[in-house]
Amino acid sequence: MSDTRKLIIVSNRMPVTVEKKKGEIHFHQSAGGLATGLGSFYRSYNSIWLGWSGISSDRINRKERESITTKLANDFGSYPIFLSKKDVELYYRGFCNRTIWPIFHYFPQYAVYDKSLWESYKYVNKLFSNAVMKVAKPNDIIWIHDYHLMLLPMLLRKKLPNASIGFFLHIPFPSFELFRLIPWRKEILNGLFGADLIGFHTYDYVRYFLISAYRLLGYEHTYGQVIVGNRVIKVDAFPMGIDYAKFDKATLNPKVKREVKNIHKNVNDRKVILSVDRLDYSKGVLQKLDAFSLFLEKNPEYKGKVIFILLVVPSRTKVEHYRLLKRQIDESVGEINGKYGTLDWMPIWYLYRSLPFHRLAALYSVSDIALITSLRDGMNLVSKEFIATKRNRHGVLILSEMAGAVEELGEAIIVNPNNREEIAEALEKAMKMPIEEQISRNKIMQRRLQHYNVVKWANDFIDSLHKVKEQEQKLYAKVLTPEREDKLINAYVKSNNRLIILDYDGTLVPFAGSPEEAKPDSKLMKMLKAIANDKRNTLVIVSGRKKETLEKWFGKLNIGLGAEHGAWIKEKEWDMIAPLRNDWKIRIRPILESYMDRTPGSFIEEKEFSLVWHYRKVNSELALTRARELKDDLLHLTTNLGLNVLEGNKVIEVRNIGVNKGRAVLKWLSKKDWDFVFAAGDDLTDEDIFAVLPKEAYSIKVGLGISQARFNVESIKDLRLLLKRFEKAV
């Protein structure tokens, strides 16, 4: 990154927290995976980190506010955002943690849908937007983090239309059936689509997001790439890493060594099970306590020989569900210790606090087993930190299959966190696992974590953001700008032998199912007639529609026609492009009928030399699944039948090999030496036209996207405005 280009990191909290005690301002490092993970990374860049200062603006005066801002900028490379007590209550404790958090973690029963909380969420996102605008320049990179700021990307996009904006979600993205419960789900999606790159921890979250975007906003994707207006947005998975070296070398730290020695004195030769979680219902703390109790019940030989260190870090203690959870954990720990404990042995050591790094690293080091039973977890960095401390040392990771980290840590013992018997059996298996096997498993995971550490994760995200912007610039480079359009019109005016080739659906009119819905309007007919009547023009419309339909619409115009993607062509009379057969329909039609029966809203269109399965009116998620299945079946069945399976816009068509729009267009291209060739289309079927055109031809794709066309226009409206200039130039 150049010295003039800043990296602006934006998150709910900065890596530094501000507190006011006894009238004095104090600064200390923030807790949490994001602040810890990116703490070293962002300092290596020309960067600034924006976030809430952690202190209520009600508690400080103007002078203190200015002093805090200066101190954070000079000493920590940070820029504070000040929130009032009301903002914190409604935005953070309210919408973020009472609406978004429970829904995204699959606890809809805890979700609150309160419009006042939503209004506060919007307001605070605007505060963040205003703060970013005070420090951002047009060429800066803006990296927004997490669920607190899902409206911010679009707010910034409107102010900085050419900025490089990335967004990363550190919690799970839920399935559509849960996400749709949020009344403001469309606004949230639109907010996120202000980013150029949207990142998640796993491909499951990517998939859930894309399904929601498709079903709620109608946005389709190609390999995670979504076209929204004239912008390209990439959606991808980036599993967050840790500062591997920090944990790998932790046991060499004198402070850690002393702490390890102290712990060993207290545990003696007992096996140590470790659990480290923030107080949250998504972490499955009660489930692991229940499973540990079952383990002791089923394996009495381990009584007195094992210690379960339960570290619970306080969180959101003012939220009702968290206070209740704390009380339930307290009661469960007391019950288990009372049931199984003896005068010289307490099975659970319960720590309700946060620990400094040297003490946490010591716990990782001495523990024989790490027990992680998240009911839903975006990633879970604790699992990675535990493994990183076990270089050439034993230790077993038991990991919930609901944690995002499971995709990288497959050598752990994987459990269903809701299955207490399975967790108890996993504890027994871990206790008995040979040391050599433990070390062998850990080495595999360590190599993976060492390679993809937090710096690699962050660099991958930033590199991908650069690539998305580069791809977008390439597409912009093909946009038909006013200057290019003027040059095109100038060439049109000066020429005497013009060939104008137009697709129909999606190019001249919006897609529609029936001919009645798709028939040309009077303005379009008037324009086409004027263009066709110019003696210097040869106008050709090549469409996938039947020849009877095209004849009905355009038969009275002085134009050439291509029907069924070029199977039929008309100069004066209709002719087949080549001898074609249609006896194959007997074998293929039953397959299409089967899919039609199983897919409400779909229908079959029979043309003379093709069969088409339409699914425009099918439920979007079902449509994607059925279309993929049908295409796979058809490709397998048509291998030796001389047929092509073509996927168009909400259609799958089966037709003879060798029939395509490009072949039909060659008929007209070979007629004379044209001094002006123009073609316009919008989908894959039109790429065959673009492929056969001479290099100097003006080819136009309607919509952004990768194409062989020389230029792009954004919409049907833009193309028709261009054709209107043809009409006026007559």
Image (cartoon, rainbow, N blue to C red):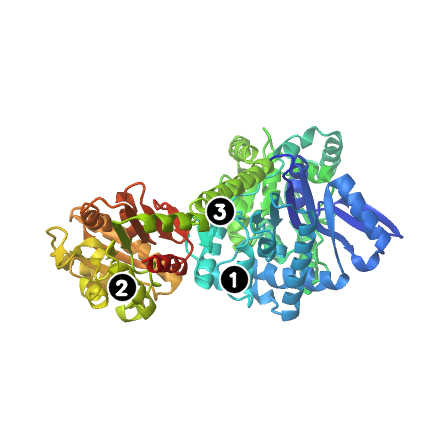
**Label annotation for residue 236:** 3
Q: Is residue 349 visible?
A: no
Q: Which residue is mark 2?
A: 529
Q: Which residue is mark 1?
A: 179
**Label annotation for residue 147:** none
Asked whether the residues under the numbered discs 3 and 1 touch, taking CB atoms below 8 Å apart as contact, a structural biologist would say: no
Q: Residue at x 52, y 51 (%)?
A: 402
Near-viewer residue (617 or 376): 617
In the rendered image, residue 559, in percent from the top left (x then y), is placed at 22, 59
Q: Residue at x 55, y 63 (%)?
A: 187
Q: Is residue 564 visible?
A: yes
Q: Along the polypeptide, which appears first: circle 3 or circle 1?
A: 1
Residue extending furthest toward the right: 22
Q: Is residue 89 above or below residue 279?
A: below
In the rendered image, residue 184, in percent from the top left (x then y), is placed at 56, 66
Near-viewer residue (578 or 631): 578
The local secondary structure at tag 3 comes to: strand
The local secondary structure at tag 2 comes to: helix
Q: Along the polypeptide, which appears first: circle 2 or circle 1?
A: 1
The image quadrant where one finds the N terminus is top right
Q: Is residue 386 above or below residue 494?
A: above
In the rendered image, residue 728, in percent from the top left (x then y), is placed at 35, 60
Q: How far apart in space, not on screen, are marks 3 and 2 (Cα)?
A: 47 Å
Q: Is residue 255 above or below residue 115?
A: above
Q: Amino acid at mark 2?
A: Lys
The image quadrant where one finds the C terminus is bottom left
